[in-house]
Image (cartoon, rainbow, N blue to C red):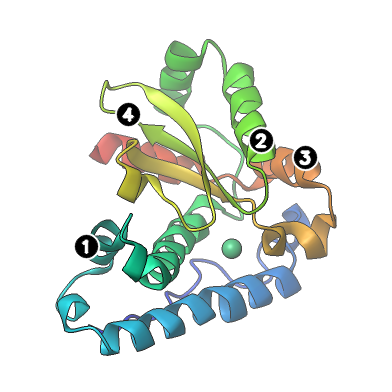
Amino acid sequence: MSFALPSLPFAANALAARGMCQETLELHHGKHHQAYVTALNALVEKNDALKNKSLEEIVKYSYGKEELTPVFNNAGQHWNHSVFWNSVSPTGGGIPGELEKKLVSDFGSVDKFKEQFKAAALGQFGSGWAWLVLASDGKLKITKTPNAATPLATGEGKVLLVLDVWEHAYYVDFRNRRPDFTDNFLAKLANFEYAAQQLKAA
Ligand code: MN3
């Protein structure tokens, strides 16, 4: 099957007042994410074993297979970015009541959740992702992955929310300041409504 770049769920300038400008989104979505989709389609075209698989199936199938590293990198990045566009919102930052209760129950407080999430985002050396997942024991958990790696493949839990901490995600808006980018995400951009929906559906 051939994969397509998903549309952004908001206008390219919709996050500008909240710390993610139109130039960032045009580059990040239109160039970076598009490049992963284009590369993935070219790789699938050359490999019969991949042709009838869904994106999720390709991510899981290629994970840890050395000869499929380019497939995993591009499929993982396509999947991760598709979640990321849902993880930011023009009305982000507010935490719905049910999710807040669960955060308090599993992390101690919303502030402790934010501290741990920030530590994961800053602790990821080099490129990667910080995640809020629902682990198999029923508790919320924070994790981080390098490069294209993803909880979808590692089995660390069902993904509720993600922050892209590759430099291309923040360099236009925050230059080298990943801590400020992460604080801004948690305060103004994070789509906790989406995370709550994913939690409900789990
Ligand atoms: Mn990215």
Query: Residue at label 3?
Result: 179
How far separated are the C-alphas under marks 4 and 3?
26 Å
Labels 1 & 3 near each other (Cβ < 8 A)? no
- Which quadrant of the figure contains the N terminus? bottom left
Of callouts 2 and 4, the N-terminal one? 2
Mark whose residue sits in front, 2 or 3: 2
Tell me the residue at 32%/49% (across/down).
152
Q: Which mark is residue 57?
A: 1
Query: Residue at label 2?
Result: 123
Q: Secondary structure at mark 2?
A: helix
Kindly identify the amino acid type of the residue bearing the numbered disc 2. Gly
Residue 174: x percent and y percent? 83, 54
Q: Is residue 1 visible?
A: yes
In the displayed structure, 5 sits above or below 102; it is below
Mark whose residue sits in front, 1 or 3: 1
**Badge 1, how many Cα within 10 Å: few under 14, some, many 20+?**
some
117 left or right of 143?
A: right
How far separated are the C-alphas under marks 1 and 3?
34 Å
Of callouts 1 and 4, the N-terminal one? 1
Q: Is residue 96 visible?
A: no
Q: Does the beta carbon at disc 3 come under 8 Å from ligand 1?
A: no
How far separated are the C-alphas under marks 2 and 4?
20 Å
Query: Residue at label 4?
Result: 135
Of callouts 4 and 3, the N-terminal one? 4
Residue 123: x percent and y percent? 66, 35
